[in-house]
Image (cartoon, rainbow, N blue to C red):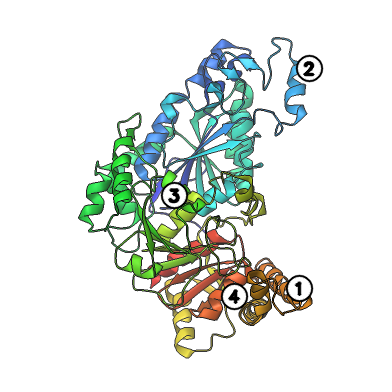
């Protein structure tokens, strides 16, 4: 099936390269001082000053591609190759092989160079060159290997933002760019290398690598140039490839970000929106206005959450890690509320965080319950430690996605907090469908307990008219989900023992119930990974027992349309958000 998008690079080889809105990214690989400045690791390794000058010359076309991508509203990722100071993440082969084979010099990774220790994180030479300095709303990915997917959360970064199509630039073509390009191809992404933005230290190998990228009629992907993407940016409106909000609201992240980029102050913006701001929040807003900087083009350099107001329910202490993480990203904390959904629906805040998801929702409010432990609950009071999760309330699922995808990869500041959170290696890696669910279709199962005719009719309409879908057998996923719901709702021994260890309920009964709950959660997760007949989502009506079961299985769920819940197994947050955003638009 031919894939089309409103924008494309028509001159790409071997065919036009589509640029789908909200799903296109630019990845600039390793444009670090160590690789492209004359006193860095690359210059030391390169046998020819002339060849190295060509690599240094990549900065200008890379900047052209970066400017075009920023104008179009793409997701931007900058990678940096380097190792922790003790080199514990650097295999001996990486240092010993070159040390033994090289007769021109004796410097290798970790040793002191003109710009600090070579390829060591924190050294001056390890950082991105000033001309391509990342903005605060762009991703910087530190990688220990040549491929950008190895031992990093790159797959999750891209999937969390809905990315399916990638433009590549950077160094070196024959090594890090080629490795990442091949990895991305295996992960399901459509890939296109910008050849004039990509180079290396051996002309013959670079030329062969460039041919390889689009060889065999696109076996691995496409190739184009910075001039081609610049031409697209000149003709298209600003933000053409950014996420498009399904509803108009001044309180969405995109709307607020646009105001702040245009020069609006946080204090005046919140005041104009009639948001009640406490004295401490007013002080925080004023401080934010003083810290704003600009990038190389004079554009304000702001994080996506800069100036975004949020509240929490009373279970969150002011010192909760998730609150501190959001404040560090520039968000403005307004305090606690009694009802998260009401706070968002009334326009009191953009986000509201709660430790539970309520079956009572409000108009123009979406709720998203994240995978258990993907966000820290340190500093919160949980109804039950067994259900260790957070729910995000926002005007749209796109906003919930923005928040989740931003803070899910932020590090905890203590070992205890980090131990309670999922590491990226523990999260599911599911190949990406470059067509998107709007073209590739959705495999959905309906929860067996959902027998209300009006609900079944609504689901059928969504997945037959508004969004292509195929209903699959729900027996396995529904039965394990129903078991979890029953155990979570009825097996009070688990909660009682957690809250009152000296209760009269026997430890044996508690262990049996906890084991049964764990088994149900495991079966539920496996049901989403059982082949082409497994569902992408389980669809259920909004009800208390459904939401309790979501927490019990450690999964994720999106509440859309006030009566519909889209449920996924743990780690499938990106998939559920992809589908949820489309369903939200369909409604």
Quote the CA–CA distance across marks 4 and 3. 28 Å
Which of the two residues, 391 or 365, is positioned nearer the viewer here? 391
Mark 1: few/some/many CA within 10 Å (<14, 14-19, 20+):
few
Name the mark nearer the viewer: 4 or 3: 3
The x and y percentages for residue 150 are 66, 41
Residue 66 placement, left or right of 98:
left
- Please state the horizontal and vertical placement of residue 272, each as a whole percent of the image: 20, 54
- Label 1's element? helix
Mark 3 highlights which residue?
Answer: 326
Which is more N-terminal, label 2 or label 1? 2
Sequence-wise first label, 1 or 3: 3
Residue at 48% over, 51% down = 319
Q: Secondary structure at mark 2?
A: helix
Mark 2 and mark 4 in contact? Answer it, CB < 8 Å: no
Label whose residue precedes the other's in the sequence (2 or 4)? 2
Image disc number at residue 535: none
| Residue tagged 2 | 100
Q: How far apart are the alpha carbons under marks 1 and 3?
A: 37 Å
Q: Is residue 343 visible?
A: yes
Q: Which residue is mark 4?
A: 549
Q: Which mark is residue 511?
A: 1
């Amino acid at each position: 099936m031919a894939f089309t998008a409103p924008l494309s690079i028509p001159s790409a080889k071997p065919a036009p390269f589509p640029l789908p809105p909200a799903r296109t990214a630019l990845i600039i690989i390793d444009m670090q001082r160590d690789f492209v400045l004359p006193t860095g690791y690359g210059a030391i390794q390169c046998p020819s000053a002339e060849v190295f000058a060509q690599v240094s010359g990549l900065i200008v076309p890379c900047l052209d591609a970066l400017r075009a991508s920023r104008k179009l509203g793409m997701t931007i990722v900058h990678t940096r190759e380097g190792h922790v100071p003790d080199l514990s993440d650097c295999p001996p082969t990486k240092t010993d092989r070159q040390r033994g084979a090289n007769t021109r010099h004796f410097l290798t990774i970790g040793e002191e160079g003109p710009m600090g220790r070579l390829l060591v994180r924190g050294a001056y030479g390890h950082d991105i060159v000033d001309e391509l300095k990342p903005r605060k709303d762009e991703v910087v990915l530190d990688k220990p290997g040549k491929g950008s997917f190895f031992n990093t959360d790159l797959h999750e970064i891209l999937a969390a933002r809905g990315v399916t199509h990638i433009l590549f630039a950077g160094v070196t073509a024959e090594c890090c760019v080629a490795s990442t390009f091949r990895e991305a191809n295996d992960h399901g992404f459509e890939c296109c290398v910008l050849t004039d933005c990509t180079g290396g230290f051996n002309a013959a190998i670079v030329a062969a690598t460039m041919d390889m990228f689009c060889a065999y009629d696109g076996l691995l992907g496409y190739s184009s140039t910075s001039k081609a993407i610049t031409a697209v940016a000149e003709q298209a409106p600003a933000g053409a490839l950014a996420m498009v909000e399904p509803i108009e609201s001044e309180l969405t992240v995109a709307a607020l970000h646009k105001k702040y980029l245009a020069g609006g102050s946080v204090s005046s913006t919140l005041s104009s929106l009639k948001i009640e701001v406490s004295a401490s929040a007013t002080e925080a807003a004023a401080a934010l206005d003083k810290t704003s900087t600009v990038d190389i083009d004079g554009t304000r350099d702001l994080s996506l959450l800069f100036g975004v107001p949020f509240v929490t329910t009373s279970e969150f202490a002011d010192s909760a890690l998730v609150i501190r993480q959001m404040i560090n990203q520039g968000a403005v904390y307004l305090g606690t509320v009694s009802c998260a959904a009401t706070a968002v629906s009334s326009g009191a805040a953009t986000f509201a965080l709660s430790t539970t998801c309520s079956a009572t929702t409000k108009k123009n409010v979406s709720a998203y319950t994240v995978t258990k432990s993907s966000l820290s609950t340190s500093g919160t009071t949980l109804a039950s430690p067994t259900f260790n999760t957070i729910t995000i309330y926002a005007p749209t699922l796109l906003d919930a996605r923005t928040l989740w995808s931003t803070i899910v990869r932020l590090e905890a500041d203590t070992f205890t907090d980090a131990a309670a959170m999922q590491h990226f290696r523990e999260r599911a890696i599911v190949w990406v469908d470059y067509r998107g669910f709007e073209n590739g279709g959705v495999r959905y199962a309906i929860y067996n307990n959902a027998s209300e005719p009006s609900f079944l009719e609504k689901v059928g309409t969504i997945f037959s008219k508004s969004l292509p879908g195929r209903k699959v057998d729900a027996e396995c996923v529904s039965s394990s989900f129903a078991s979890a719901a029953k155990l979570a709702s009825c097996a009070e021994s688990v909660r009682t023992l957690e809250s009152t260890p000296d209760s009269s309920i026997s430890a044996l009964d508690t262990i049996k119930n906890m084991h049964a709950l764990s088994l149900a959660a495991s079966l539920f997760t496996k049901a989403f990974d059982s082949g082409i007949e497994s569902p992408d989502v389980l669809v259920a009506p909004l009800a208390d027992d459904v939401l309790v079961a979501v927490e019990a299985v450690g999964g994720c769920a999106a509440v859309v349309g006030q009566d519909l819940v889209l449920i996924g197994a743990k780690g499938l947050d990106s998939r559920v958000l992809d589908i949820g955003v489309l369903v939200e638009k369909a409604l």
